[in-house]
Amino acid sequence: MGGVDFVNLPVSTDIAEMAVKKNGIRGFEVLHRQMQSAYDRLTEDSPDKLFALGGGCDADVPCLLYLNEKYRGDLTVIWLDAHGDLNTPEESATSLFYGMPLRSLMDVKCFGLLENSLPLSTSQIIHAGGRDFDGAEIAFIKESGMSSYTVQEIRSDNGLLKRAVDKKHSGHIYVHLDLDVLDPADFPNTPLPVDGGLYCKEVSSILNSFADELVGLGIYEYAPSGARQAFVEKLIQFGLTL
Ligand SMILES: [Mn+2]
């Protein structure tokens, strides 16, 4: 990509290996290997800013742990997602890691996937647009006091996320964008769509409101299709200007 340091990290396509369960996580060894290689590459290149394109939400784990270490815990993460991504391996009914990435970031050993990294604290995270939480995830949010805002709260108050971020007093903001935070009527191209999401223009306006403070953006869960491809291209253009 012209003018941009672009790194394409290979991922396993071995279905049999992805099915092998360890530590309560399906495909643990594959995830461990891929996350470690992404993390090592980031550490080696040591970028100040990062634009990541997935893949599944789990691909943001090495990116966020790298940035959290780089900025020594001075990082605020806005996690835009229809789902919580907050299960522990014990709480997960499926043992699929894509339901766990946000929670793994707060675990001191990242569930064994990246053991030497600095975990995020719940106070660094703002979950936004969630509407399909499991019972254990709702309990976790309640007990931990982690910030979590619904689509309705965000829609009815333009400055809500901006104020929530300002309260964290961090100079480094990262946006994790799981495309399923979007309303399927407006953007259907995700593997796990959930009704009642944000509109594309609302997500664009959220991104623009943080454009000057962003140290990173991750875009995940795109199911490639011609429909709404223009919006994804717009997001990529935005990411490339960070
Ligand atoms: Mn997700």
Image: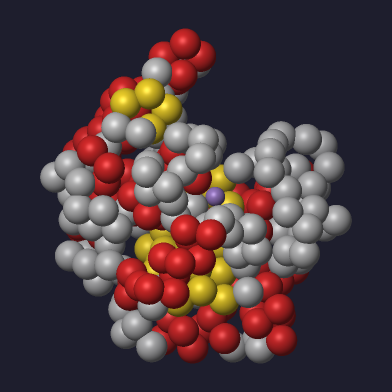
Q: Residue 3 at x, y = what percent?
A: 45, 44
How many labels were placed on the picture? 0
Judged left or right of residue 213, residue 206 is right
Seen from the viewer's position, the closer of residues 7 and 164 is 164
Judged left or right of residue 20, residue 55 is right
Q: Is residue 24 visible?
A: yes
At 79% from the left edge and 47% from the top edge, which residue is drawn? Answer: 188
Judging from the image, the colouring scheme is: secondary structure
Q: Residue 92 at x, y = what percent?
A: 46, 43
The single residue placed furthest to the left in the displayed view is 116
Q: Residue 184 at x, y = what percent?
A: 79, 53
Judged left or right of residue 17, residue 201 is right
Residue 6 placement: quadrant:
top left
At 68% from the left edge and 43% from the top edge, which residue is drawn? Answer: 192
Answer above or below: position of 102 versus 160: above
Seen from the viewer's position, the closer of residues 43 and 185 is 185
Answer above or below: position of 165 versus 40: below
Answer above or below: position of 50 versus 90: below
Residue 26 placement: quadrant:
top left
Seen from the viewer's position, the closer of residues 138 and 155 is 138
Q: Is residue 212 visible?
A: no
Answer above or below: position of 176 versus 57: below
Seen from the viewer's position, the closer of residues 143 and 176 is 143
Q: Residue 29 at x, y = what percent?
A: 31, 23
At 14% from the left edge and 45% from the top edge, which residue is drawn? Answer: 116
